[in-house]
């Protein structure tokens, strides 16, 4: 390869993966997703639909509305960053309303979940999940609710903060077994072919 | 260059000076750089990623991932679930100085004698391209000793064991109850007590995020700084190798690379050692095709990129009535070796280890059941602090069709063809994984698990075998020293050389092979044959 060729080609398309993109293929992203349609409108209605969808898809009685609203915002941001995704999500949400007889928000949990189950493999819902699974759980408010303690190095690790405080099982041996050595190879007739 | 720059990057070496050029600074490349420079050989290390150190690292899973992981575009194909779940992330490896040793957990079991003779021991396995290694455990044993001492493996050479953390206490109790005996908190290359100038573990977790304390061995904290101190290393971070060139005699003579500014540079080479991990290494050889090497450099056998292995790589998570808090403490300081044996009465060839594993909620949500949602999924997330976890690492079968190729339809940020990773599970892999999940059910069931979830393999952390070592040049890419069969001064110095994958975590073996290769290179250079 010549130097010119490298320079010419170093105009990046999508150079890197974002964590919210990991579960969808972005290797050949273009705006040419079939179906066309409108961009995702960042309206109150869109937000309410997304929050409802997320609460049905990721039900946590302990979570207040905040984490779901934050996640809905992340989905709107992701959709605005990629026109094809925006159109797919717009169509997907409209499809949920249609299937619900006009208003997805009016369905009870079971009925709403059934509609989502029917669409589990559709791109719009996979794209939403790819973003949501990162946005919803990658935040200190949710960590605290789940019993995760976040960064530890600045607090001296867990050496004096319970790394070994499990008390419902007996203490376990930490050294290697001192008895007969481990058998590594069990000879069988078959193996010697 | 200022004194500070020399301390950080080493002594500058002229680009037209033919030196040993090492591509990659991880377990293989970093070790090789130290072993060569401490004996006075001059080396340039080209590292594609940035120079991150302890202060840069963050105790945050996704932020650290964005900082450290190799995120350049890649594509996938084949029937493995990763192609669907993480289509552009076949592997979870590091792009930074120190390579994937900066995010590895630290388990250091050795390979077993019979694993070096997999073809002879396992016999003909349909669909598998098994081959015996051209070296034996006996030959590698002294280098294993040196590697364990360098890395400070616990339970070895008088090094004490790490204490039991909560996740280990669950694993070890379950293991004992179902009759396993060969469990311990190591061997594990994180200090239980201060060693080699590095502190003891403070049980901070975050092994995958770079280790801010320095208790864990990596080439970033040991081999790279020591190599820089010799005055014989020029470390060039943010330099992506794009082609290895050859002279009229067929020997390699230079490496072309893109520097941090994106400019194409050329470093003259006396010897080239490729250690870019098992996806980038074959990619670079394939991108180095020329008139002399039309199918890629060192690829007259057609084996470059083939026999890609990724280990068994499943995980099991169990939830309990009472708290576990698996996130507290060392991530993988717990190893059960009972199932590592080869014993075909279990219905498969080769063996596997069970090792503790913990993820924070951010990663657990993405990897527990990729794409998962609904009440079943959130019940697991709600149980976060009541969950224990284990990783299953075992030998997978090499297959010629599991391979790295250049995908010329998709370009990376430099305009270069991205690597495509094709993988299909072998029936032996499926049988072993199924057996291992069952073992996990029994182990956790014996200590009262309410449920056990079988997490499918996620992006590969163990990437092996794409430039395999072989006695016969027709069967592989490199010889018993890692030297390309086709090119006398071209070496491969990472896990790509593994003829078969064995059951154990590969880093210790990569380091041992690199120490051995350095000795060979030094002898050849002294004799004037390199």
Image (tube, coloured by chain):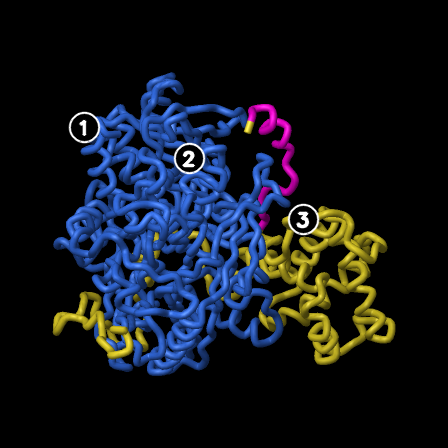
Chain colours: A yellow, B blue
| Disc 2/disc 3 C-alpha distance (Å) | 28 Å
| Disc 1/disc 3 C-alpha distance (Å) | 50 Å
In the rendered view, tell whether residue B59 sits above or below residue A110.
above
Q: The N terminus of chain A lies in which quarter of the figure?
A: top right
Whole-percent x, y for residue B41 in the image? 24, 27
A139 or B298: which is nearer to us?
B298
Residue under the image location 38 percent in, 16 percent down: B1
Q: Which residue is mark 3?
A: A28
Label placed on residue B332 = none
Residue under the image location 38 percent in, 67 percent down: B392
Q: The C terminus of chain A lies in which quarter of the figure?
A: bottom left
Query: Is B385 on the left or on the right of B161, as rendered?
Result: right
In the rendered view, tell whether residue B417 sits above or below residue B44.
below
Q: Which residue is mark 1?
A: B526
Whole-percent x, y for residue A27 in the image? 63, 49
In the rendered view, tell whether residue B110 sits above or below residue A171.
above
Label placed on residue B47 = 2
Whole-percent x, y for residue A113 in the image? 70, 76
| Residue A10, magenta (yes or no) | yes
Asked whether disc 2 touches disc 3, contact meaning CB atoms under 8 Å apart, the reply is: no
């Amino acid at each position: 390869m010549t130097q010119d060729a490298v320079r010419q080609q170093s105009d990046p398309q999508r150079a890197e993966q974002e964590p919210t993109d990991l579960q969808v293929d972005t290797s050949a992203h273009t705006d040419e997703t079939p179906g066309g349609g409108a961009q995702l409108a960042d309206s109150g209605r869109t937000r309410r639909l997304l929050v409802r969808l997320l609460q049905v898809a990721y039900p946590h009685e302990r979570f207040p509305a905040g984490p779901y609203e934050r996640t809905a915002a992340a989905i709107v941001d992701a959709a605005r960053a990629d026109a094809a995704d925006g159109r797919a999500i717009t169509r997907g949400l409209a499809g949920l309303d249609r299937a619900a007889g006009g208003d997805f928000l009016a369905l009870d949990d079971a009925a709403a979940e059934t509609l989502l189950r029917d669409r589990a493999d559709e791109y719009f819902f996979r794209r939403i999940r790819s973003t949501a699974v990162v946005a919803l759980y990658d935040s200190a408010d949710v960590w605290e609710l789940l019993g995760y303690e976040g960064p530890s190095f600045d607090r001296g690790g867990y050496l004096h903060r319970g790394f070994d405080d499990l008390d419902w099982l007996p203490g376990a041996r930490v050294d290697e077994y001192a008895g007969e050595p481990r058998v590594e190879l069990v000879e069988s007739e078959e193996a010697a072919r | 260059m200022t004194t500070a720059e020399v301390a950080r990057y080493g002594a500058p070496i002229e680009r037209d000076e033919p030196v040993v050029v090492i591509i990659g600074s991880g377990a293989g490349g970093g070790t090789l750089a130290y072993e060569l420079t401490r004996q006075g050989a001059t080396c340039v290390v080209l590292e594609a990623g940035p120079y991150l150190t302890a202060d840069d690292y963050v105790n945050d899973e996704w932020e650290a991932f964005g900082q450290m992981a190799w995120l350049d575009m890649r594509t996938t194909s084949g029937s493995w679930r990763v192609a669907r779940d993480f289509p552009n992330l076949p592997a979870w490896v590091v792009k930074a100085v120190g390579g994937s040793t900066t995010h590895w957990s630290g388990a250091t079991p050795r390979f077993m004698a019979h694993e070096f003779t997999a073809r002879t021991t396992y016999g003909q396995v349909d669909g598998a391209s098994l081959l015996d290694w051209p070296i034996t455990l006996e030959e590698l044993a002294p280098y294993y000793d040196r590697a364990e001492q360098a890395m400070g493996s616990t339970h070895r050479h008088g090094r004490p064991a790490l204490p039991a953390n909560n996740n280990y206490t669950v694993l070890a109790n379950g293991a004992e109850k179902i009759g396993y005996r060969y469990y311990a908190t190591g061997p594990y290359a994180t200090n239980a007590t201060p060693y080699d100038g590095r502190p003891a573990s403070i049980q901070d977790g975050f092994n995958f995020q770079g280790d801010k304390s320095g208790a864990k061995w990596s080439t970033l904290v040991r081999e790279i700084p020591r190599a820089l101190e010799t005055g014989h290393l020029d470390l060039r971070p943010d330099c992506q190798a794009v082609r290895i060139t050859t002279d009229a005699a067929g020997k390699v003579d230079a490496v072309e690379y893109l520097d941090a500014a994106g400019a194409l540079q050329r470093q003259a080479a006396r010897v080239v050692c490729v250690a870019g991990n098992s996806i980038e290494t074959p990619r670079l050889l394939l991108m180095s095709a020329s008139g002399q090497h039309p199918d890629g450099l060192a690829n007259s056998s057609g084996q470059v990129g083939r026999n890609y292995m990724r280990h068994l790589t499943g995980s099991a998570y169990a939830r309990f009535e009472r708290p576990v808090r698996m996130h507290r403490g060392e991530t993988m300081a717990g190893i059960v070796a009972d199932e590592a044996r080869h014993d075909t009465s279990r219905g498969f060839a080769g063996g596997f280890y069970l090792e503790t594993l913990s993820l924070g909620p951010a990663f657990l949500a993405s990897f527990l059941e990729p794409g998962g949602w609904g009440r079943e999924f959130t019940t697991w997330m709600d149980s976060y602090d009541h969950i224990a976890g284990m990783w299953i690492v075992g030998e997978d079968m090499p297959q010629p069709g599991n391979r790295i190729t250049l995908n010329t339809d998709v370009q990376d940020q430099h305009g270069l063809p991205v690597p495509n990773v094709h993988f299909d599970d072998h029936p032996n892999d499926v049988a072993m994984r199924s057996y291992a999940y069952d073992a996990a059910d029994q182990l956790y069931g014996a200590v009262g698990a309410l449920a056990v979830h079988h997490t499918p393999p996620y992006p590969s952390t163990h990437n092996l075998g794409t430039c395999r070592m072989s006695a016969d040049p027709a069967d592989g890419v490199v010889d018993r020293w890692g030297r390309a069969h086709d090119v006398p001064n071209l070496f491969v110095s990472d896990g790509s050389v593994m003829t078969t994958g064995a059951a154990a975590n590969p880093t210790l073996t990569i380091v041992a092979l690199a120490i051995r290769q350095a000795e060979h290179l030094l002898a050849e250079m002294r004799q004037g044959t390199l």
